[in-house]
């Protein structure tokens, strides 16, 4: 894993690109280098995983005409090496980066990307064609941002901070992004919190030649029509066998590394299944890592992780932490470069920091819920879809009843369920957005009266584009192109790469994702039975108490922290005259929301976290 940055321009400045790369050293602390072409400079800070001694940048083809800066892992690089050598290519290293340079000699940009099995973001300068390619993997596991000037100059980087390091790039906060942030908890792709800075979409390659820039799609999720799904011959037994084979292969290819390797283990189905297969495939005991908090309230998963560790004989390490929470908030915002509403970034950061003391690569269970239908909101969405338009009186009664139930009975889903029920009358996807959003729609309007809905319109557009597909596949696709892309994947990338730790996700393997979309929806979710086919695929590996565990988010007790350790810090950040956020949201609404939470009249933990990280971001920008 690495950080990449650079520029394609009429006038090149090596010092600027060195500065860009320097800002990414946390992503690649082992070495750094530049490839300098006649119209572009590519920079890379390297985290050495494969060919530790021979794979330092810059990397080129045999002629030196094609240079590559690369972030990620190409899992089929051995097969590509053999193919390239059989066609007469002279490869100088044993690292995966070099295959990209040689493939560019023979393939057009889209075909080049299709040949790569892995997680990646790359920049490639082809001197023969005088063009720059910026390619990103199918799901967007690895980040890649860019900015283009009016004269065609193009600046890019793995993180926004590297793009902003170029003095040509203006530093203007997008107010539209604030409206979207209140709805989603992030600025939805391809937008960012900075005007003019965009992300390369997943499954796309950007082609820049002179002043012309094209963003071309090379892959899209293989969503099928209802008729195609109905005609599928797969039953649960056959589907589970296929999933097991695909997942085993996905884990196997991710065990290739020339450095120490381990796994995150929560004791849930997904991470436990990954560890089980690692133990089967690895000749040595698997190293596993779990985190807990000293002031935990029901978030401690260590007993389940211990059970799985004992079952598979792993070398298990537990971390119990009591971090400086205020200082940590500041660090998280620096690494994200933008406000980020998902507070589970905090334990992810700490787990990555502590795991990095033992390993350089870790496998994780991310993606099982996204690919196989594991979230409760998916069941709720399908229920709404089946009922179509529910009478307003019934919805009002349901919302009122949910409002009177304590969170303990609702198993921690109270705020999300209440928001969902309030919006069911608008149908899907509006109700689904209310569930996943961090700020109640009513409070969004109070905080930003007359706000723009452009982010929500993009959400609705993605939903509309899948019309005709099976309802569950529509929900999964929407989640794949929103929550997975802009929340889950950036969280694991930024928080792990903050410490130079590479995290690999077998459940998001290209072949696993393709298979999951081929499976009939009923094999993934039926009623309240979620991830049916995945659980069936690993039923012989895991005990019932792990297979049947209720899903828990990787969270922290924010409501308690905002009434305890973080209270004075958050009050000072959000409710005083020095606040920056009052320039963008109604300060009276912020104080009212804070008072309600402190009084216990409502649970606004996620909204407060979202506003707090927005305030930290704005103060950094104003400094």
Image (cartoon, rainbow, N blue to C red):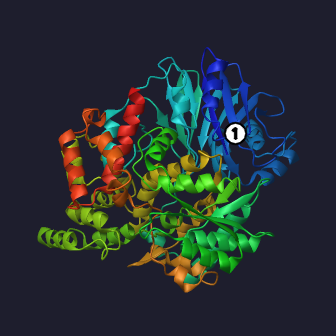
Task: Name the image quarter holding residue 55.
Answer: top right
Quarter of the image where one finds residue 247: bottom right
Residue drawn at (54%, 67%) of the image: 516
Q: Tell me residue 355's x, y (percent).
A: 64, 57
User: Is residue 199 visible to the viewer in this orientation of the structure?
Assistant: yes
The relative height of residue 82 versus residue 555 in the rendered view (above or below) is above
| Residue 312, image x, y percentages | 69, 77
Q: Position of residue 22 (x, y in %)?
A: 64, 30
Residue 233 visible within the image:
no
User: Is residue 234 depicted above or below 445 in this figure?
Assistant: below
Q: How many marks?
A: 1
Q: Residues within 10 Å of mark 1 (few under 14, many from 20)?
A: some
Closer to us: 260 or 74: 260
Q: In the structure shown, which secondary structural element does the residue marked by tag 1 occupy?
A: loop
Which is more toward the observer, 124 or 159? 159
Pick the front one: 461 or 396:
396
In this rendering, is residue 411 above or below 608?
below
Q: According to the image, label 1 marks what residue?
A: 29
Task: Please report the residue visible at 54 percent of the width from the left and 40 percent of the height from the top.
Answer: 216
Could you say where residue 102 lies in the image, as x and y percent from the top left? 77, 39
**Image-based side of 406 in relation to 60, left or right:** left
């Amino acid at each position: 894993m690495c950080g990449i940055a650079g520029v394609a321009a009429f006038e090149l400045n090596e010092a600027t690109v060195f500065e860009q790369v320097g800002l990414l050293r946390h992503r690649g602390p082992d070495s750094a280098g530049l490839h300098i072409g006649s119209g572009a400079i590519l920079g890379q800070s390297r985290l050495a995983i494969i060919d530790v001694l021979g794979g330092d940048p810059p990397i080129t083809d045999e002629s030196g005409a094609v240079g590559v800066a690369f972030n990620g892992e190409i899992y089929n690089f051995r097969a590509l090496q053999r193919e390239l050598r059989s066609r007469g290519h002279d490869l100088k290293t044993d690292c995966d980066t070099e295959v990209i340079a040689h493939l560019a000699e023979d393939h057009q940009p889209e075909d080049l990307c299709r040949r790569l099995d892995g997680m990646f973001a790359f920049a490639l300068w082809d001197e023969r064609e005088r063009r720059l390619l910026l390619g990103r993997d199918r799901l967007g596991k690895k980040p890649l941002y860019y900015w283009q000037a009016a004269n065609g100059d193009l600046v890019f980087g793995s993180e926004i901070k590297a793009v902003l390091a170029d003095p040509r790039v203006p530093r203007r906060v997008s107010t539209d992004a604030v409206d979207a942030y209140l709805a989603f908890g992030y600025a939805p792709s391809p937008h960012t919190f900075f005007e003019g800075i965009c992300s390369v979409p997943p499954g796309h390659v950007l082609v820049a030649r002179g002043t012309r820039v094209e963003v071309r799609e090379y892959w899209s999720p293989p969503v099928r029509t209802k008729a195609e799904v109905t005609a599928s011959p797969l039953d649960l037994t056959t589907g589970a066998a296929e999933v097991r084979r695909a997942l085993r292969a996905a884990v196997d290819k991710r065990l290739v590394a020339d450095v120490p390797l381990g796994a995150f283990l929560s004791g849930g189905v997904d991470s436990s299944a990954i560890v089980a297969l690692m133990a089967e495939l690895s000749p040595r005991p698997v190293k596993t890592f779990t985190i807990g908090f000293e002031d935990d309230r029901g978030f401690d998963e260590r007993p389940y992780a211990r059970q799985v560790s004992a079952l598979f004989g792993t070398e298990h390490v537990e971390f119990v932490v009591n971090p400086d929470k205020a200082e940590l908030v500041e660090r998280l915002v620096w690494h994200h470069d933008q406000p980020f509403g998902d507070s589970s970034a905090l334990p992810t950061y700490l787990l990555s920091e502590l795991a990095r003391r033992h390993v350089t690569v870790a496998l994780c269970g991310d993606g099982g819920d996204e690919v196989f239908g594991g979230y409760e909101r998916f069941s709720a969405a399908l229920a709404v879809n089946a009922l179509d338009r529910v009478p307003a009186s019934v919805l009002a009664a349901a919302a009122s009843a949910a409002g009177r139930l304590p969170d303990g009975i609702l198993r921690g889903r109270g705020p999300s369920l209440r928001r969902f029920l309030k919006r069911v009358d608008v149908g899907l996807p509006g109700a689904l957005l209310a569930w996943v959003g961090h700020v109640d729609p009513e409070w969004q309007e109070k905080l930003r009266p007359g706000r723009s809905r452009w982010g929500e319109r993009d959400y609705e557009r993605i939903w509309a584009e899948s019309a005709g597909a099976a309802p569950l596949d529509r929900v999964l696709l929407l989640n794949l192109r929103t929550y997975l892309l802009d929340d889950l994947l950036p969280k694991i990338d930024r928080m792990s790469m903050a410490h130079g730790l590479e995290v690999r996700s077998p459940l998001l393997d290209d072949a696993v994702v393709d298979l999951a979309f081929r499976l009939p929806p009923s094999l993934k979710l039926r009623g309240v039975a979620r991830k049916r086919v995945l659980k069936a695929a690993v039923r012989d590996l895991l005990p019932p108490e792990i297979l049947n565990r209720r899903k828990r988010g990787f969270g922290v007790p924010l409501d308690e922290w905002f009434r305890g350790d973080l209270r004075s810090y958050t009050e000072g950040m959000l409710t005083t005259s020095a606040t920056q956020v009052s320039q963008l949201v109604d300060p009276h609404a912020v104080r009212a929301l804070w008072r309600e939470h402190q009084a216990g009249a409502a649970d606004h933990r996620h909204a407060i976290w979202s506003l707090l990280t927005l305030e930290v971001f704005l103060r950094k920008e104003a400094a």
